[in-house]
Amino acid sequence: MSNYHIKHLEEYFQVYRKSVRNPENFWEEVAEEHFVWRKKWDKVLEWDFSKPEIKWFEGAKLNITENCIDRHIHIRGDKTAILFEPNNPEEEAQHITYKELRKRVCKMANVLRDKGIKKGDRVVIYLPMIPELAVSLLACARIGAVHSVVFAGFSSTALSTRINDCGAKMVLTSDGSYRGSKTIDLKGIVDDALKDCPSVESVLVAKRINSDITMKEGRDEWLAPLMEEAYGDYPAEVMDAEDPLFILYTSGSTGKPKGMVHTTGGYMVYTSYTFKNVFQYREDDIYWCTADIGWITGHSYIVYGPLANGATTVMFEGVPSYPDFGRFWEVVQKHKITQFYTAPTAIRALAKENLDYVNKYDLSCLKVLGTVGEPINEEAWHWYNDHVGEKKCPIVDTWWQTETGGILISPIPFATPTKPTYATLPMPGVQPALMDENGSEIKGNQTDGRLCIKFPWPSMARSIWGNHQRYKDTYFSAFKDMYFTGDGALRDEVGYYRITGRVDDVIIVSGHNLGTAPIEDAINEHPAVAESAIVGYPHDIKGNALYGYVILKETGESRDRDNLKKEINQVITEHIGPIAKLNKIQFVPGLPKTRSGKIMRRILRKIASKDTKNLGDTSTLLNPEVVEKIMEEAL
Ligand code: WTA
């Protein structure tokens, strides 16, 4: 029996039992058999959630790029490692082989070293989805610098906050980026941000859009000529398993963003293991995750996990709507994608459009479909299953977080029977627990509670950069000796998990706990509804009442609004019960979203509560004009 590659359900249960009975042995076997180490560990695991302190493979020495690149050179050096699909479909795709990737990474490592970057220094990467982005993560890892990628859609304020928080010495950026038919002036944003970032000594600029930019003398330099001259080999820095690999910022419910610190050995083992199993990756597959590398999904499942498995991983520069809503499917057909991994928000957006955009393309190459980032509603799940997977591709609804580093709960395709809206079963080594409000674990099935994890897994974040106390307070204080996810979940009669949404989104109405996700799910079942968001607002009698923001499909626009409201409440009554009926329903043209596609419920709550004087931090808001409109028409 292979621990590393699970192929059927019985095997999953066997592996799972083994992984829980003796986690150290389990992960030791995986680590020993599938990776190259300069030196093996002295101890597999050391942990104490009360401090909290977590160490995996302590004493081991390695470099993650030797695992992601060098060791593949002899076996698959000419295989495509990164397949770059540009924004403009007329521009040719680039196939970067493992050999070529090694050369580029080594060259950039030399460039970084020549600029004075050394082991432990922080480098902020603010690049669009072009090959230089993946290369720069790996170049940092090659020399032992800690990368912190800031999604290249964040504003200059958000960028400078992150640069200052981690004290970055260097920023890697580009002249600009393409986004559909638009271009974005990234270098201008960096210049703005750097007005207030004393730690930054140098800025390297990749050329992408050939725009006119200003280069600051003594600080800024073009990357390409430096790469051209640099030597194409670089001995990998030998790192400790627990040396930081990267910092990635995630927004907290309050306060400034949290710089989650991920370390090297455990992160590599876990992302590689989960990639192999969750996507059932085979040697000749072409895997595509549509996320941006600026998010954890891109770190773990575009770069490190796939490359550690010697996979071909697609990097897509564009957007799903350019040049039209068929772009995803055009790319799937063109590159014969076998695994396709995207977000529910993208699926919902595409499901709103004409089916011809999908049906036009031959998608028979697809084997596995994935989703991540938020609960997927039933309607979107079925659309994805019926029209993209043509009912032949298992959908892996993968639940995880920036903090967890890798996927914790997900079906294993062709092994775990899927169930719409359920992330199903924990990955080997992952021990979930549902907790009640009094801090006790709820045993048994058919129950729901706060989702915690009882035992460490190798890729969990080790700290918040510069603020270990906040790490402890946020994740290890709500429940004793548990990692608290901040999510609610239910466990069905067979033990499948369904993530019901952030517990901060739970609304208590007349003493009943209502999750926003199931209500939204219900509303979205209404044929005229495209998308919805529910928040609570203070109510004299019920404590809280429900306010629904609803986007109609084009077909619903002409309908009588009062009738629609009645029907929506009827659907909710049917799916959940009259207790979940909405007090107010506002039809809106869009929902305020973060740049990563999450609904900004905080803003919706403020509008629902008529508390719009101070909307709080809106720097990550993608569509401020929608907020204006919603406020104007608020009920
Ligand atoms: C939510 C993204 C339901 C969840 C990898 C989590 C999900 C937060 C799912 C983390 C899913 C992620 N089903 N909810 N499959 N995946 N979430 O840090 O609330 O951007 O806590 O990491 O997204 O978001 P993050």
Image: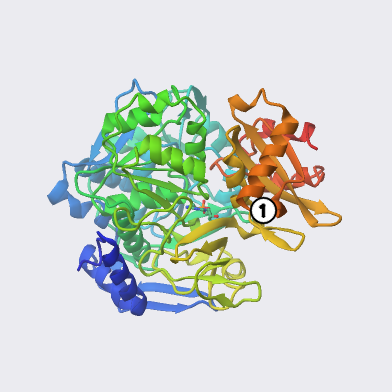
Q: Does residue 590 appear in the picture of this structure?
A: yes
Q: Quadrant of residue 253?
A: bottom right
| Quarter of the picture holding the N terminus | bottom left
**Residue 57 versus residue 600 in the image, above or below:** below
Tell me if 53 is positioned left or right of 555 in this view: left
Tell me if 101 is positioned left or right of 186 in this view: left
Q: Does residue 195 appear in the picture of this structure?
A: no
Q: Say which residue label 1 marks.
A: 577
> Residue 157 location in percent, x, y?
63, 42
Q: Residues within 10 Å of mark 1 (few under 14, many from 20)?
A: few
**Residue 396 versus residue 634 in the image, above or below:** below
> Residue 479 location in percent, x, y?
59, 74
Q: Is mark 1 within 8 Å of ligand 1?
A: no
**Residue 87 versus residue 167 in the image, above or below:** above
Identify the residue at image location x=39%, y=28%. Answer: 358
Identify the residue at image location x=51%, y=37%. Answer: 348
Colour scheme shown: rainbow
Q: Circle 1 sits in a helix, a strand or a loop, which is it?
A: loop
Tell me if 266 is positioned left or right of 463 in this view: left
> Residue 597 location in percent, x, y?
55, 41
Q: 232 or 459: nearer the eye? A: 459
Identify the residue at image location x=31%, y=47%. Answer: 110
Tell me if 520 is positioned left or right of 4 in this view: right
Type of amino acid under label 1 = Gly
| Quarter of the picture holding the C terminus | top right
Q: Residue furthest left?
A: 74
Q: 314 or 70: nearer the eye? A: 314
Q: 398 or 516: nearer the eye? A: 516
